[in-house]
Amino acid sequence: MRIAVLSPIAWRTPPESYGPWEQVASTITEALVKKEHEVSLFASGDSITAAKLEAACELPYEMDRSCDPKVMECLHISNLMEQADDFDIIHNHFDFLPLTYSKLIKTPMITTIHGFSSPKIIPVYKKYNASSAYISISNADRSSELTYLDTIYHGVDPSLFTFQDTKEEYLLYFGRIHPEKGLDKAIAIAEKANMPLKIAGLIQDEHYFKTQIEPHINGVSIQYLGNLGKEDRDLVLGAAKALLHPISFEEPFGLSVLEAMMCGTPVIAFSRGSMPELIADGVSGYLVHSVPEAVEAVNRLDRLSPEMCRTHAVKNFSRDRMIQSYEDAYERVVEAG
């Protein structure tokens, strides 16, 4: 099958550190190439892929602040749409903007909705509801106003995540640093549980970091490791006693949760959004509703088996399972015309 994968251009595909949408687009692209599909990846020019790379911009706009992001997005999307006839299907990972081309081209489009940045964007999805196929990344992230082809959970290659049976005595926060992700609550949980906390992630809200996070960082009991790359990520995820994920929003998925479990590391998460779909409570982690409940869950971590965490992740969230689901979805869309 001739497949065009449209990745975002905020970060490189795959990203060097942060960039979950780009990471998923990359994982899908490389797996499709291995399955001998004819794949073109539309991404930034510094992207790394075994597919044919099509780039309208040399660097991601988060790396090249001299460019106008909206201009680069327009050039990027139009670069694909002007070649649409060369493909059997377009797999859109670039949110709602590409949908505005969908009735102007003959090639069918499948859109993975990675989350809704605001309810204000839903009218665009509604307009193209009947002419485009939508994939949700969790059942929790579905809009009642839209029709979906399927829910396909993100998957990763298990071989890229090192299983660690022996854990060190620290808790971990791994993710973007923003109030909705709950790092302040993770600090409170660690302090009350009397365990060290290591922090890794992109600082997305500078004011929040400066006022609520930085005063707690002392380099001993609370450490900030920076925005880690893949090798360091693997080490710090695998050695942690648990990943803390005390979110305060309805999270669509949560790649770090999957990646931790893939390393054999349990996750203590607030039971919101997709968390009940990702975490097997009492098997691969604990679903809680408050800081005190999370502290109590820390005291029960020894009841969990790293092997069961890994088994749960591989069974439900492997790359191969994800790709088979997408191949099935492509065939359904192409056959429907």
Image (cartoon, rainbow, N blue to C red):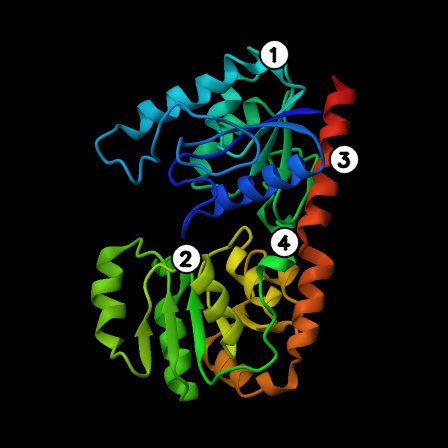
- At label 2, counting other C-alpha atoms closer than 10 Å, the crowd grade (few under 14, some 14-19, many 20 or more) is some
Q: Position of residue 139 (x, y in %)?
A: 65, 49
- At label 4, counting other C-alpha atoms closer than 10 Å, the crowd grade (few under 14, some 14-19, many 20 or more) is some
Q: Are marks 2 and 1 in contact (CB under 8 Å)?
A: no
Give the residue number, with chain letter if any, for mark 4: 157
Q: Quadrant of residue 46?
A: top left
Dot placed on the residue nearer the N-terminal end, 1 or 4:
1
Q: Nearer the viewer, residue 204 or 46?
A: 46
* Mark 2–mark 3 distance (CA, rounded to whole Å): 32 Å
Q: Quadrant of residue 109?
A: top right
Q: Are marks 1 and 4 in contact (CB under 8 Å)?
A: no
Q: Amino acid at mark 1?
A: Asp
> Which residue lies most toward the front here?
50
Give the residue number, with chain letter if any, for mark 1: 85
Q: Amino acid at mark 3?
A: Asp
Dot placed on the residue nearer the N-terminal end, 1 or 3:
1
Give the residue number, with chain letter if any, for mark 3: 328
Does residue 144 appear anywhere in the picture?
Answer: no
Q: Is residue 35 above or below residue 304?
A: above
Q: Tell me which residue sits at (71%, 30%) in the image.
A: 330
* Mark 3–mark 4 distance (CA, rounded to whole Å): 19 Å
* Mark 4–mark 2 distance (CA, rounded to whole Å): 16 Å
Q: Position of residue 35 (x, y in %)?
A: 72, 37
Dot placed on the residue nearer the N-terminal end, 2 or 3:
2
- At label 3, counting other C-alpha atoms closer than 10 Å, the crowd grade (few under 14, some 14-19, many 20 or more) is few
Give the residue number, with chain letter if any, for mark 2: 229
